[in-house]
Amino acid sequence: MTGAAIIDIEGLTKVFSGKTVVDQVDMTVARGEIVGFLGPNGSGKTTTIRMICGLLKPDAGSGTCLGYDITSEADRIKLEVGYMTQRFSFYEDLTIRENLDFVARLYDLTPRAGHVDRTLAQLGLTNRQHQLAGTLSGGWKQRLALAACVMHKPQLLLLDEPTAGVDPKARREFWDEIHDLADSGLTVLVSTHYMDEAERCHRIVYIAYGRVVARGTVPEVIAASGLHTFVVRGGGTATLARRLRDRPGIEQVASFGNDLHVVGTDQQLLERAVNEAIAGTGATAEPDATSLEDVFIRLMGQTADNFDGSEPEARA
Ligand SMILES: Nc1ncnc2c1ncn2[C@@H]1O[C@H](COP(=O)(O)OP(=O)(O)OP(=O)(O)O)[C@@H](O)[C@H]1O
């Protein structure tokens, strides 16, 4: 299947109680890619992932995952996918090894001990194999969950916010692991709210109200946003932010430590507005590269939190 898309879905739609939570989502993921799936809470990421791996039937749309039809060949997909859910679980009163042995049993892997040994070594868990899972720190729990997902040698990993609540060092190590797995040919679709994680993906797909509103590599998404950014420094940021907001040409003001990122789509109008706002304040303003975070703050601002039930102001 080399060259063929690992995920290829078109028009995927899901309606819950009359509410369309996934709305005509198209997505293609090639072998070996790490694709980040981003969007506000409740925007439809988990629902999309569950349809991709055959756990949930779409109300409209079609597609394949690993070459299998997502509606008629769901059983085949489930066997070849590693799915780490948001609330992954294992037996806290069993050791790491015993937990993996249990998973090997579920997948009917033989010889069981061999598969467990290989997976322990692959995920750097061998030295801790006899530690009770319940005594592990968040980062090691995540690693055990990943081990349980990859032991049956899936071709595709679907990770739903795998590092939520994990400290930065453990998150970084987890991502090094993801890249190692991708280098060995595994394909990864990973949902996340973390900006640094989005930047570690080959491509990202951003969804809001069930619809894809941005996609591409990080530079492509930044370029497509059409945003320009000025960094304002000096003076009290809170006072300056008040002066900057609500001026024509200024569409977003966000604090980054002692700096303010001031963003707009019309560069000339933005520059004029910024210079007017800071005149006489002692602050300085310089054009700077728009960051992915600037773009996401903007996308979130346009669409609000998907849980609040309000309609988005703008839809792509
Ligand atoms: N089984 C279900 N029945 C009814 N509504 C559901 C069901 N599953 C999800 N929803 C609703 O569908 C919407 C999308 O939920 P989903 O979990 O896919 O979003 P998400 O982007 O993964 O959110 P988060 O980032 O918070 O995990 C939400 O409004 C959610 O309440």
Image (cartoon, rainbow, N blue to C red):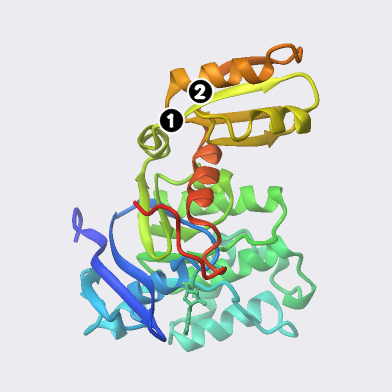
* Beta carbon at label 1 within 8 Å of ligand 1: no
Q: At x 65% / y 65%, what residue is drawn?
A: 126
x, y percent for residue 143:
62, 64
- Identify the residue under disc 1: 265
Camera-side residue: 272 or 153? 272
Q: Which callout, 2 or 1, points at the residue further toward the start of the chain?
A: 1
Q: At x 56% / y 45%, what residue is drawn?
A: 195
* Residue 258 seen in render: no
Camera-side residue: 246 or 295? 246
Q: CA distance from mark 2 to mark 1?
A: 8 Å
Q: Is residue 156 above or below residue 272?
A: below
Q: At x 68% / y 17%, what residue is drawn?
A: 278
The quarter of the image holding the N terminus is: bottom left
Tag 2 near tag 1, CB within 8 Å: yes
- Identify the residue under disc 2: 270
x, y percent for residue 90:
64, 81
Task: Indicate the amino acid at tag 2.
Answer: Leu
x, y percent for residue 111:
46, 81
x, y percent for residue 93:
75, 85
Q: Residues within 10 Å of mark 2 (few under 14, many from 20)?
A: many
Task: Indicate the amino acid at tag 1.
Answer: Thr
* Residue 13 seen in render: yes
Q: In which quadrant of the rendered view does residue 95 lie?
A: bottom right
On screen, residue 276 versus residue 227, left or right, reads: right
Q: Is residue 234 above or below residue 84?
A: above
